[in-house]
Every structure is written in C-alpha cells, then in structure tokens.
Image: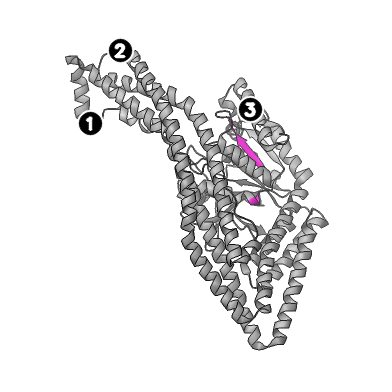
Amino acid sequence: MARSRDQLTIAPIQQSVVGQSLPSLGSGIVDGSTRLAHLARLAEELGTDPVAIEARELSVRVAEGRFYVACVGQFKRGKSTLINALISEPVLPTGFIPVTAVPTVIRFGERLHACIRLNDGSWTEVPIPELKQYVTEELNPENKKGVKGAEAFIPSPLLSSGMCIVDTPGLGSVFSGNSAATQAFIPHIDAALVVVGADPPLAGEELALVEAVSKQVHHLILVLNKADRTTDAERTAAAAFTRQLLGKRLQREIGPIFEVSAQERAENRGPLRDWEKLKRSLQQLVDSSGRQLVRAACDRGIQRIGEQLLAIIHEGQEALRRPVEESEGRIALMKQTISEAERSMRELSFLFMAEQQRLSDLFVDRHKAFSSSALPQGRQEFQEACRFIPGGFGPSYRRRVMKVAQDIAHHHVVPWLRPEQEEAEREYRLVALRFVEMGNDFLQRLATAGIPELARMPHALDPETGFRVRSTFTFLDFIEVAQPASPLRWLADVILPLVGARKVIQHDGQEFLVRLLETNSTRVQSDILNRVQESRARLEVEIRKLLHEVSRIAEQALVRARKLKDEGEPAVDTELARLDHLQHEVDVLRGAAQP
C-alpha cells in the first residue's frame, strides 16, 4: 500500500496512508496546505532539502486535518494506560518503571498496526505487540536504537475525525533523554491532555511543563488519574489545589478537572466517575476546535519555515551584491570571530561558574541549618525509641533497630525535602534564565563585532525550565544496609545479645540514622548543581551550533555567488531578480498565515 510521509522536525515522523480519508475541514485549511506546498517548492529552489521536506510533509498533515493532542505529565501518572483506555486498545506498553522512551503518535487507521522510523530515515512496519521493542525505556534505554518516530494506527472512532493522541515520555524520569524528548516536542503540540495525581497533586516540574505548554496552546484538558487509589477527600483537596495553583501561575481560567481511574477503565471495572465527561470533552475539542487547531499548526509552521527561507535568501542577495573579495574577507572575519568567540566562551563560563557557586553556597547553608536541628533531635528520638524495641533473636533485633532509624529519618527528611525542592526549582529557573540572558548578550556582542547575521537569525535562545532528571530516593537504596551483610555479621548478631552487647547494634543503628539524614538532606544540593551544569553545557552547545550555522549559510551563498559572477553580470542580475521574487513570495505566504 502506497504511503506519503508527514514529518515533524523533532519527532515523531508521520505516515499518511493513501485512501484513508478524513473529513474536509474547509477552504482555509486547504489554502494553508497549498501555502505550505508552495513554501516546499521555494525551499527546493533555494536548495535546502530539509526545509522542503518539512514543509511538504506538514502540508500533507494539514490537508488531512490532523492535529496533535499530547498527553503530558510526570513519570508514573498513568499516561499510557489512560490513552489505551481512551482508544479501547492495549496499544501502548505500561509498567511501574519509566516506560515511554520517545513520543508515540496514536492516529486513525483502518487496520491495527505500528510504524517505526529510525534516524537513518527508514520506515519499518511492525505488529502492535512489537512496538515496545522501540518505545519503552526497558527495551530501548534512552533511545539507544535511534528511533526518530513511532506511530500506531488504530480504527478508533475517537480518532476518526483527525485527532492524534501523542504519548510523551514522563518528566521527572530518571532518564534525562526522556524528559528532553518531551520538552522538544512542545512546539508541535496543538492541544494538551495534562495528567496529574493526588499524591503529590502537582509537582514543581509538572507545573513548569504545563506553563510551557500553555504558552504554545490554549486548549488544556486536565485529568486527575488513579482516582481509585485515593479517598474522596484527598481527590477534592488535590483538584482544588491544582486548580488554584494553575490559575495563579497561568493567569487564566482553569476548566474542569476530570477524576478518573484509567486502570479501572482499561479493565472495564469500577465506577465511571468522570470518564464519560472526559470523552465528551475530547469529542467536543474535535467538533468545535479541530479546524482551528489545524489552522494554528499550519500558521506556526508557515512562520517558522518562512523565517528559515528568508535568512537563506538574504544571505544569497548580500553575497551577490558585494564583491567576491569582500565576501571572502567577511567570511574570513566571521571565522576569526567565531574562533575568538570559542576562546571568549571561557569568559562566559566564568560567569556561569559564579552562578553555580552562589547556588552551591546557598544550599550548603540550608543543609547545615537542617542538620544542626535534625541530627540532635533524630539521635534523641532514636535513643528513646530503642528503649521500647523488644529484644529477642539478634538478627531480628537489628532489623527492628534499622527500621526505627529509617522511620525517624523519613519523618525528618520528607517534610523538609518538599519545600527544599520547590526552592531549588525556583532558584534553578532563575539561574537558567540568567544563563540565557548572558548567552544572548554574548551573541549580541558578536553581532556588533563581526557577525551581524546573528541579529537576523530566527528564534533566540530559550531558557530551560524544570529539573530534567529526578534523583533516586536513597531511603529505598539503604534498605539493604539494614540487613545482615555477611554470615559473620549474622552470627555476631546471634551471639552479641547473649553477652549483653545489644548496644553495639544500637550504635550501628544510630550511625545508620545519621547516614540517612546526611545523604538525603544533600540530595537537593546535588540535584540542582547537576542540573545547572547540564543547563550550562547545553547552552554552550547551542551557542556554538548557532555560530557555525551562520557561517555555513554564508559559505554556501559565497560559493553560488562566485559561480554566477564568473558567468557574468547578466547571470548575477537574473539571480538577484529570482531571489527578490522568492523573498516577495515568502513574505506574501507568511503574511497570509498571520491571524
């Protein structure tokens, strides 16, 4: 069966099956598809095949009236289970560990199957049960197989009118690549199905994600999942907290929050709760806003692609109008400036390091304040509790002592940890924004010092928001420490109580308590410093990529200008006229796409 391909720049890559028709959404959508197809032809004329492919494939998506509703939320919110329940097919793998490794598009199809596209551009059709080989963290850890896109085709009535549901990797996963994939997908979202929970109701990272998504889309459908695992009072409190926090953060009215249990619905058991209301809300989104969402996606694509083409056209015009020697000197100066910029990046790095040190000092002080209070109090509570621990068999006594230490540490750390993480999130966002400001200031200085093209490059550097990697809660890791480590330790625990040396076990328990308090209370400090370091490294990479992209465009324009000038002035005039005409066409197409 023949197929045409509809590709997103990031992922996933779309596949449109010929003969699989969707309802027409009106002349406005058709006009948008035509404009995108025209931009694709202009990109081909300019010799930029990647832009041409993006425009052509977005044109197919728009013509078919497909729009993306991304299911977003933190790790373990049950997003994949929710999607399976909505489409009434167990298509997506689910589990208790971070499952989704790459964004996966669920779209309408006459027959049930899946398609995978790898980084080399090849498409592979796979049976639905094999989808997990490519999209799960367990079988494709951190996307080691290089999957660029994954799609599942489902004969679901919910998807028959153009809506595609996207399963995104959960934020807060221990795998940084997963969260980055979700962040990268945000520009391609047309609407969002935001999945939250009651425990905790809304984490700081989720709040940052919803805020980022809300800047891209207007339609947010909020779902409080796993309703079967909480009481009515807990769900009511969580929904009120979520609505209040989002309303304040987003400065907009928050719609209903649908309380559901996706697991119960997938297994066709339990009360419906708000399930039918959620399905009606999605259908209403299709009926009342589907056309608008497709048009908005079309207009965003036209603006983005148009900006890329205008940058290439402008460079070509300038290369033809100035003498070849001037262009050569200009490129040489540009390369020299870029080379010097690499050296002067060290100056920028020192500013980054100063921000890192400030954060380190801040959280070291906060950790010291916690330790000075929690350690003495924890020791006292431990000694008091040991008076009431029944004696008996030595190894059992050790386990009881270690369990007391864990409970006391948990009692002190958890209430302190949550506000500490919120403060760390706030500080991280501030420093990330500061990094971006410094990076853009740096680029602005280069623009005035020898690379004016930087001022014309579309899309400035964007600030990173939210933690990309969640630390492991070390209480769980230390459970093994509370068990006998060797046969000799077990034998000693058997003998020691007989000679009245139970205090040795209590001493070990107290040391274990101190270790728990110290290790867990340094988690936030370690996390934020790691995130800042990653943010800094990514930003420096983006700056370098931007500099070298500017240089590449200029060099390509010079090569063509030199060839045309060798052919003579008529060839140059003809090319200038062609570029002027292309510029006019792009301007017209972009203007027609604006609201």
Gap between marks 1 and 3, in whole Å?
Answer: 48 Å
Gap between marks 3 and 2, in whole Å?
Answer: 43 Å
Magenta region, residue range: 187-202
Crowding at mark 3 (Cα within 10 Å: few <14, some 14-19, many 20+): some
As rendered, which of 563 and 153 lies closer to the eye? 563
Residue that badge 1 annotates: 486
As rendered, which of 282 and 482 lies closer to the eye? 482
Picture quadrant of residue 269? top right
* N-term-proximal mark, 3 vs 2: 3
Gap between marks 2 and 1, in whole Å?
Answer: 23 Å
Picture quadrant of residue 545? bottom right
Residue that badge 3 annotates: 241
* N-term-proximal mark, 1 vs 3: 3
Q: Is residue 175 visible?
A: no
Residue that badge 2 annotates: 390
Could you tell whether 220 is left or right of 26 in the image?
Answer: left
